[in-house]
Structure formats: C-alpha cells, structure tokens
Image (cartoon, rainbow, N blue to C red):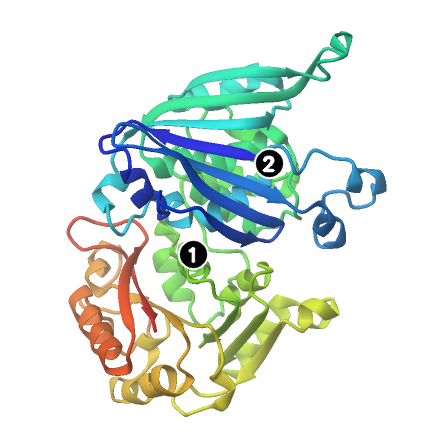
Amino acid sequence: MLLTLSTTHSPATDLGYLLHKSPHKPQSFDVSFGLAHVFYPEATEQRCTAALLLEVDPVALVRDRQKSSGEGRSLEQYVNDRPYVASSFLSVALSRVFGAALSGRSRERPELAARPLPLTARLSVLPCRGGEVFLRRLFEPLGYTVTATRHALDATVPEWGDSRYFTVTLDATLPLGELLSHLYVLVPVLDDDKHYWVTEDEIDKLLRHGEGWLASHPEREVITRRYLRHQRSLAREAMARLSEGDEAPEPEDAPSAPDDGEVMLERKVSLDEQRREAVLSALVEHGATSVVDVGCGEGKLLRALLQERRFTRITGMDVSVRALEIASERLKLERLPDLQRQRIQLLHGSLLYRDARLTGYDAATVVEVVEHLDPPRLAAFERVLFEWARPGVVVLTTPNAEYNVRFEGLASGGFRHKDHRFEWTRAQFESWARGRAERFGYGVRFVPVGAVDAEVGSPTQMAVFSR
C-alpha cells in the first residue's frame, strides 16, 4: 500500500522537518502488522514528495489471534486485499511513523506546522464502499479537490465491470496535521472495516483526530458509525459527545481514581491520550524495544505499550500496591496468552531507592510522576534513574505551571492535583532537565504536548533524554 504526500511550498524540502523524516535517506519502521518504509521520490526546493509504503505480513495477520479480520472466516485469512489497499493499517502507520506530524507538532518548524500549505495526497489503491459519490461526500466538504480513477475488477474480463477500488488524489491548502487527521479517520471509514477489535478507546481516538471538523461534517453520523465498526452503543456515545462539544475522560477512569481531579481539569484539552501518543512516538523514534514505566500507576501507558509488538520487554513499577492491582486488572494479565504474558511484568518498589530490577532497559518513561515527589527527594530519584538504572532513553512529562491560568475553576497559584508537591514553569523545567542531562551524560530535547498557547505554552511539557 502506497501513500504519497507532496507540497510545492518553498522551500518544499521543509516537508522533511514537518514529518520528522529526512529526505536524504530511506527509513524503515516495525509496525504490528509488518514494516513501514519512508522515502522521498523527489526532494527539490520547488517540489517535495514523501512516500509511505506499507509492507503487510499476511502470515503474521493469520497468526495474530487478537486481530478481528478473518476471525471465523478461514478462507478470508488467506485470500484478501489487506496487503495491497489503504485501510486501518494505514491509520496505525500514520500514528506510529508520523505521530508528531499527525498531532500538529514540529520541533524544527513549529510555526510551519500550524500554517496552511499547498498539499497533495495520493493513495495508490483505496477501497470505497459507497463508490465515488461517497468518497466525494467525505472529502469535498473539508475543502479538497478530489480526483478518483476507478479500477476494473479484471482488465482482462471487461464484462465483470468496475471494482470498488480507486486511485485517489486529494489537493488542498491546509496544515499537514489536518490532512493526516482526515486520512487517519476517513480511510477506515471508506474501507468500512478495521483489522482490530474496536473498544471504547476508539471513541477517544475518533474525537481527538476529528477535533475541529467532525462535529460540523455533513456525514458525521455515517463516519462515526463506520469508524466504530457499526457498534451501536459506541456510536451513540460518540455522537452524544460530539453534540455536547466536550471530550469526556476515558470511561475506565472511575470517580474514586486518585488522579480524577487532574483528569477532570484537563479533559477539555484531551491531554491523557495525547501524552501517551507523544511518549510512544518518542520511544519508536529512538528504536526502543524494552521499556520500564517508572511510576506506572494504573497501567494506561503499559496497555498502549503492550499493543505494540515492537516492545518485547515491558515493566511497570509503582510504590502503590492498589495501583498495581488496578493495572493488573486493566491489562487482564491473568487472561493474556502465554507469549503476551511473558512480555510484561509489574513490580512493587520505590522510585527513591536503588533497584537492580530497573537496569538493562532501552528506555524508561516517567509520565506525570516527578511533581508528586517532595523537592528534597528529587536528588535521590535522579540518581536512581539516571545514574544507576541508566537507560538509553528517558521520556519524562510534567505539567506546565504557566498553562494553569487557562483552566477554569483553578485558583490562582493552585496546582492541578491535590497530591502535587510542585509544578514547574517552562524555564524551571528546562533548567532542571539540562542540569540533569549535563550531570549524568545525557542530551535532552523538549517537546510540547497539547495545544500550544502563544503566551503560556502547552499544557504538558516533555523532555526526551538520550545517552
């Protein structure tokens, strides 16, 4: 399956900065269903084209019992169009390979990421259940000029007529992140199928990637229904939330959860899912396969890591026994197949004491943890993580205190959660992170998470330390 993205913006090679992929070398990435290759057929100042080629492993699809496609339909497991056409596999690849661009972020060209650019997307083979008319009803209200070439079912047998497959070109002037979001949602809608089981998590993905356009789209009901694989209860919930214009927190967040205050405060900007996407993107970018989540809490990030086959060794550690019990239930550890169960473990332990079990990992994640530590104890935590565990990569997120003025109902100078011991400004966080990087032999870069406000920055700040 081939997708190409082109621009005539000058200089056109800025497309490489937006996609976080260099035009000067081809790259390949492991995805759960095979390989994704990124290369540039052309890269000049006048025009630049990036290609995403998916190499789907059909044998792995049959062996993967967690995938829904072909389940109970033995012939379809071996005779299908999945390796050749745009489908939900493309959405997964966009999220994993172009995650930063999909979320509208660019380290080197942040202002360009938000700017409308002349863009062309070409899908080599796109299944359209509903035909060209439905294809146009989806994309034209979003401002695209649609060119569609329908393929014959079999060119050697013309009497069989046309197939449901099209080569589609989409032209528009818009930010790259918006185009990728449209493809992320609408390609599986046109295919009217997904290669994995759809759960309540898909509602959050739909609303996040549909933010700003789905609620007003004339076909929003059919988009919602098809995206959620015609599961009526999920579609009803998604439509209700679209009508309210409010993205509620994940259904799994029970009212008694210890971080409810923070989740409720941040739900309008959907930070919970965005943080996980940003962390996963950083881990994939650095090629990590073994990860320890320090202060794993109730296991949301662990679940996302477990869904990616590239992560072969996953460990969650927390000081709270109750949080680990909830994580075990959420991950359904007792019911996992043996091979899956061997990939993950939960550890009870403190973040403030040297622990040999934390060594030997490619990466460590510390998601919304440091602000719960008393400042005098930070030094011990730093040595445990950077000096003794010493992973190749550390991905750490924490609230941006400057953004708190944008939260309605939060008292001036107040913290987002009653258990926070401090919250850093951007300058304070960068000063702390640069100091730890220099002391322990790491480099560090900073990534905003969430919508960036011109005055106060993003709601969450993330540092990626690399050794």
Which quadrant: the N terminus? Answer: top right
The quadrant in which residue 182 appears is top left
Q: Is residue 212 visible?
A: no
In front of the other: 213 or 246: 213
In which quadrant of the rendered view does residue 211 lie?
A: top left
Question: At which x and y percent is residue 131?
Answer: 61, 17
What is the number of the mark on residue 40?
none
Mark 1 residue element = helix
Q: Is residue 300 above or below residue 220?
A: below
Mark 2 Cα shell of 10 Å, populated few (<14), some (14-19), many (≥20): many
Q: Is residue 267 above or below residue 341?
A: above
As measured in the structure, the alpha-carbon distance from the residue carrying label 2 to the one carrying label 1 is 21 Å
* Image-based side of 263 in relation to 158, left or right: left
Q: Which residue is mark 2?
A: 87
Amino acid at the residue labelled 2: Ser
Residue 115 at x, y percent in the picture: 25, 35
Q: Amino acid at mark 1?
A: Ser
**Helix, strand or loop status at disc 2:** loop
Residue 254 percent coordinates (x, y): 52, 64
Q: Quadrant of the C terminus?
A: bottom left
Residue 281 is labelled as 1
Q: Is residue 454 visible?
A: yes
Label whose residue precedes the other's in the sequence (2 or 1): 2
Q: Residue at x 44, y 41 (%)?
A: 39
Residue at 27% x, 70% y is 443
Query: What crowding class fits label 1: few (fewer than 14 Cα within 10 Å), some (14-19), or many (20 or more)?
Result: some
- Count of labels in the image: 2
Front residue of 53/356: it is 53
Q: Residue furthest top?
A: 159
Residue 202 percent location from the top left of the image: 55, 47
Relative to residue 59, is residue 290 drawn left or right? left
Instruction: Give 339 or 329, whichever is nearer the viewer.
Output: 339
